[in-house]
Amino acid sequence: MKTKEVVPLSYLDHRPMNEVKAEFMALAELEPQLLDLLADIKQACRDHRRQKYLCANEMWYGYRAYEGMGFKGRMCKLVGCERDGPGAALKTMHAYDVAYDYLYSQLPNCRGHEGW
């Protein structure tokens, strides 16, 4: 019996992640700071790879050890209805969904939570 390749789906619009990545890169051409944010997420993952405890939601939403430093808050200034700047395509809900989905997918899995 031949098995099908498992393709990760995006959380919000149920498309393969490679399509979401391509759309994210197109948005990054319009707003290069998205690539800076992506680089910061990847650096944070490298910085914390050996820690026993890591909570992706703390990193994303900016609470506990990441109070005031959440990646989502930074993203909201670049895409979606909170964007303050030019670029109508960047102010859409679709742009927000693509950026949210792709950037969040780059965070590591949580580990070290009590009871997990």
Image (cartoon, rainbow, N blue to C red):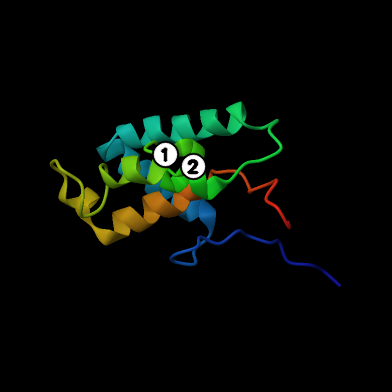
Residue 64: mark: 2
Which quadrant of the figure contains the C terminus?
A: bottom right
- Disc 1 designates what residue? 67
Left or right placement of residue 14 versus residue 99 in this view: right
83 relative to 31, above or below: below
Kindly check if marks 2 and 1 are in contact, taking CB atoms under 8 A apart as contact. yes
Residue situated in front as seen by the camera: 49 or 25: 49
Residue for point 16% across, 51% down: 88
Residue 62, quarter of the rendered image: top left
Q: How far from the left and from the top, in percent, is residue 47?
A: 59, 27
**Mark 1 Cα-neighbour bin, 10 Å: few <14, some 14–19, many ≥20:** few
Left or right placement of residue 3 versus residue 48 in this view: right
Q: How far from the left and from the top, in percent, is residue 49?
A: 66, 32
Q: Tell me, yes or no, if residue 16 can be seen here.
A: yes
Q: How far from the left and from the top, in percent, is residue 85?
A: 14, 41
Residue at far left of view: 86
Q: How far from the left and from the top, in percent, is residue 40?
A: 45, 30
Q: Amino acid at mark 2?
A: Arg
Q: Amino acid at mark 1?
A: Glu
Residue 26, quarter of the rendered image: top left
